[in-house]
Image: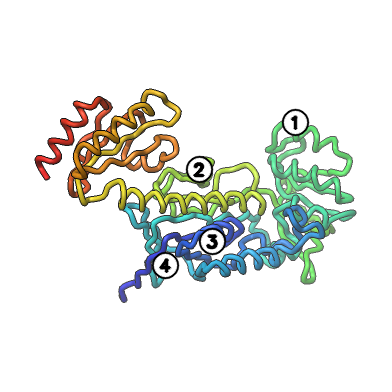
Amino acid sequence: MREKKRERYDVVIIGGGAAGLTAAIYCGRARLNTLLIEKGLVGGLATYTNEIENFPGFPEGTTGLGLMEKFQAQAKKFGVRFKGTDVKEVNFEGEWKEVHTFRNIFESRTVIIASGGRPRTTGAIDEKNYLFDKGISFCATCDAAANEGKTVMIIGSGDAAIEEGMFLTKFAREVIVSVIHDEGKMDCNEIAKEQGLNNPKMSFVWNTMVNSFKGDGHLDTVELKNLKTGEMTNYKIDTCFEFIGYIPNTEIFKEKVTLNRQGYIPTNELMETGVPGIFAAGDVRDKELKQVATAVGDGAIAGVGAEKYIADCEVFENQIMQSEKPGFIYVYSAIDDPSRELLPMMTEIEQSYGGKVKMSVIDLYKGKRLCDRLACDIEPMTIFYTLNGKLAATETDCDRPHVEQRLNKLLAKA
């Protein structure tokens, strides 16, 4: 087997939906060497939405494809490279992360996971012929206005199905809900159940599942099967909304980052996954609302996070852990008087050695990533390192005699 070609980047983004494209714009604009990998259509699920009316800046609405094309053009303007291929494997250990495709191994300082998710489908006959813009939708918020005065069907009875169904009643003439359970039994919470049952525009077809989808180019009929009698019934509708869950595209990230029980990636508000240098953004995250607008916010935060992570790495390697001379790092807090008051003394200590040692200063809160790399979570603290940039000792005792004693030992070994 031919050896894979290796290429190096500052940032590799996995997934080209709204979150990945936004992250790419931010990284490219920061002049980071950025690669975006997308195995399908750049733009993700948004490209299948005929009309988007809730994205800010488009009072007349826009198409999902048109909006995503603008995102991609903006990323390209800032020098982002695009690769249309499938990611087979990742390795997030070490300083340089690896993203493997069929022919390449892309190495990078940071990786932004924006692989999104895919709606869970029914598997019914001919379903694939009507997905997304041909009559089957997975987003009431996106497509409600397009169904003004029409008849729609909801598949599912969970919280999302009933709550989205009630939202659709503000637009549609009739909302038919197919429920697999016996009459009166649903998977949603009791409040949503009561509201749905009492909504005059909503009707429920109990003990049913979809058998097939029909239509001439565009869906116009859903055939439901009664699970008790086997009877088939056709329902004339304009759009069918499926709310039976989402499947996050995280299979290759198992045991690489933390996943929750549903397979989504938990992050903090900075989009950090807990693995240094690895961020997650968009629908792949464990979050409440999955929309283009929220994906854009995630992507912006992840892009800025990647930029700051790389900058911190360069500071850490070239300034803090420099190997020209032994030295020490003083960790303090700008909002803590005792540790702040020690700064002049530390500067005097460095100067007293006549350029033989180097001092670096880190604010515990502003330089949190740097402190994480040094395993430092308290202040004040002094960290000592040798001539070749190797950690020698970590001390919470920051009085002058103690610091000078440590430095003398380092100089004696240099």
Mark 1 and mark 4 residues within 8 Å of each other at the beta carbon: no
**Which marked residue is nearer to the observer: mark 1 or mark 2?**
2
Residue position for label 1: 191
Residue position for label 2: 267
Q: Secondary structure at mark 1?
A: helix
Q: Earlier in the sequence, mark 1 or mark 4?
A: 4
Image coords of residue 336 (percent x, y): 42, 26
Question: CA–CA distance between discs 3 and 1?
Answer: 47 Å
Image coords of residue 99 (percent x, y): 40, 61
Question: CA–CA distance between discs 4 and 3?
Answer: 26 Å
Mark 1 and mark 2 residues within 8 Å of each other at the beta carbon: no
Q: Amino acid at mark 3?
A: Arg
Q: Amino acid at mark 4?
A: Thr
Q: Is residue 62 above or below residue 154?
A: below
Residue position for label 4: 101
Q: Secondary structure at mark 4?
A: loop
Q: Specify the farthest residue to the left.
A: 412
Q: Is residue 293 visible?
A: yes
Question: CA–CA distance between discs 1 and 2?
Answer: 30 Å
* Number of numbered discs: 4
414 horizontally vs 79: left or right? left
Q: Residues within 10 Å of mark 1 (few under 14, many from 20)?
A: few
Q: Secondary structure at mark 3?
A: helix
Q: Earlier in the sequence, mark 4 or mark 3?
A: 3
Q: Amino acid at mark 2?
A: Thr
